[in-house]
Image (spheres, rainbow, N blue to C red):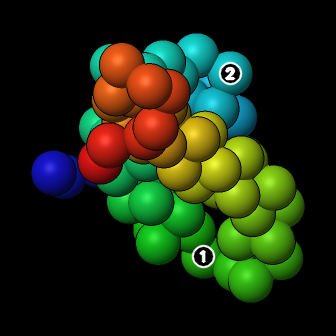
Amino acid sequence: MKLPMLSDDDRLAEIRRLYFRTSRETIQQDLARALDLLKSMSTDDQRERAAVFMDGLAEMGRGWARGKKKRTAKGRIRG
């Protein structure tokens, strides 16, 4: 996907917005978009500022992926 010309601050704001608005249904697309934005940042300092949101998105994705596992009738996790 081609990204419009955004400043690093705009990219950081978009990653932050994705972090606060993501849901179980959109996490994969939001994480991919955030990664594209992160890769397009021009400095390491800017990428470090975005890292907390990226870590949060990744953790949410892992948590929701674990939650999709089905439990058997006896309460065991099947997956």
Element at label 2: helix
- Residue 32 disc label: none
Give the residue type at disc 2.
Phe
**Residue nearest the viewer, comparing 9 with 53:** 53
Between tags 1 and 2, which lies in front?
Answer: 2
Residue 25, image quadrant: top left
Percent x, y of residue 7: 60, 50
Residue 47, image quadrant: bottom right
Residue depicted at x 58% and y 16%: 21
Give the residue type at disc 1.
Ser
**Residue nearest the viewer, comparing 71 with 46:** 71
Percent x, y of residue 48: 81, 71
Which residue is labeled 2 in the image?
A: 20
In the visual, does 30 lie left or right of 3? right
Name the residue at the bottom extreme: 44
Disc 1 and disc 2 in contact, CB within 8 angstroms:
no
Which residue is labeled 1 in the image?
A: 42
Residue depicted at x 43% and y 40%: 77
Q: CA distance from mark 1 to mark 2?
A: 23 Å
Residue depicted at x 46% and y 37%: 76
Name the residue at the front extreme: 74
State whether residue 59 is above or below residue 72: below
**Residue nearest the viewer, comparing 19 with 23:** 23
Residue depicted at x 70% and y 80%: 43
Residue 10 showing in the rendered view: no
